[in-house]
Image (spheres, helix red, strand yellow):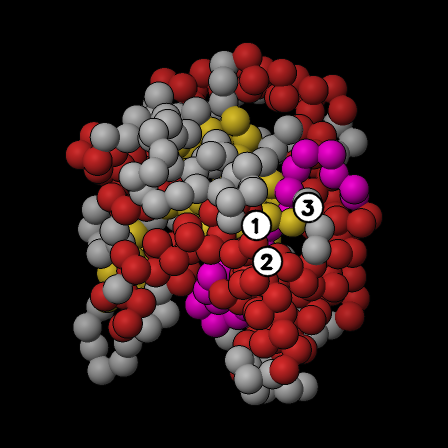
Amino acid sequence: MNDHYPDRRTFLRHSALAAGAALLGAAASPLRQGSAGDRTPRSLRLGAPVFERHDDPQELALAHRRLGYRAAYCPSVTLDDKDRIRDIRQGFARHDVVIAEVGRWCNLLDPDAAKRAENLGKVIEGLALADEIGARCCVDIAGSFNPDVWYGPHPENLSGDFFDAAVENAKKIIDAVKPKQAKLAYEMMGWALPDGPDSYLAMVKAIGRDAFAVHLDPCNLINCPARFYRNTKLLNECFDKLGPWLVSCHAKDVTWDVEMQVHFREVVIGSGSLDWATCLRRLAALAGDVPLMIEHMQGPEEYDRSRARLLEVAKEVGVSFG
């Protein structure tokens, strides 16, 4: 295992190729956004879990609309239940609610070979479901070499070997499914690749599949004081470099609990320091229709507070949620 990230020659080669390709393709890509002021803002899709229970997909879609949501997490359904998949796809489409993502939260790089194979199958199934139900993407983290916590830190999570394994897994998943519209995406993490816009861009290019895309969770990137204080710069860098591939985005906030070690914590939107004004402007300027999904709140009241704050910020910056 090589622990010289980011000096590993393979990783640098991927990075250089990715950066060059991004520059060459910026003008030609139909999904490429310009600066925040270069494009007329469009209406954004906001989504979150809803706490009404409905067996009828149309009633579930309407429950989202009553809260102002035009995007949703994928309802519970199995890949072999073709009738329910059809009903969900048609019912949500009828009420203009996009299924943003199918989550398959498991460790694709589990040190145990049997678990690793099982998890690879889960994500293959998730991508197939996303394609059948009309979701924008199936999302997971790239994984972790931590044997105890499936998403936990490990010194090799920032290595070239990790990068290569994550690339190989993405190729296997996409090639097994051959999705017609849904994308596979990795969520960025503060202690595992991809851990920022450069490593994600390198991974996109190394995977080399149109069905691989970018899922943005800005809070996951806040892993040091520099990123915390300069998160506006970090957000703009993410949109500048990854905008053409962005398919879904998570929404929460982050605060710093001051103690003798650095301790960042997820909080209700508006209670932290993330620059949501910049994030909303940049999302609205994208050529693609990228859902923004609130997550990790503790119950309906916190989701309501986060939604209300996003609506306030959107109004301040001239962005609509439709």
Residue at 35% x, 54% y is 236
Question: Quadrant where the C terminus lies?
Answer: top left
Up-down relation of residue 186 to residue 109 (above or below): above
Residue at 41% x, 50% y is 239
The residue range painted magenta reads 177-197
Query: Are dots 2 and 1 in contact, CB under 8 Å?
Result: yes
Query: Can residue 282 be seen?
Result: yes
Disc 3 crowd rating (10 Å Cα; few below 14, some 14-19, many 20+) is: some
Q: Which residue is mark 3?
A: 210
Q: CA distance from mark 2 to mark 1?
A: 6 Å
Query: Are dots 3 and 1 in contact, CB under 8 Å?
Result: no
Residue type indicated by callout 1:
Gly
Q: Which residue is mark 2?
A: 21
Question: Secondary structure beneath disc 3?
Answer: loop
Residue furthest out toward the right = 176
Q: CA distance from mark 2 to mark 3?
A: 14 Å
Question: Secondary structure beneath disc 1?
Answer: helix
Q: Nearer the viewer, mark 2 or mark 3?
A: 2
Up-down relation of residue 160 to residue 88 (above or below): below
Front residue of 225/62: it is 225
Residue type indicated by callout 2:
Ala
Residue type indicated by callout 3:
Asp
Horizontal and vertical percent position of residue 44: 38, 30
Residue 188 among magenta residues: yes
Majority secondary structure in the magenta region: loop
Res 25 label: 1
Q: Nearer the viewer, mark 3 or mark 1?
A: 1
Left or right placement of residue 284 versus residue 114 in this view? left
Disc 2 crowd rating (10 Å Cα; few below 14, some 14-19, many 20+) is: some
Residue at 41% x, 29% y is 45
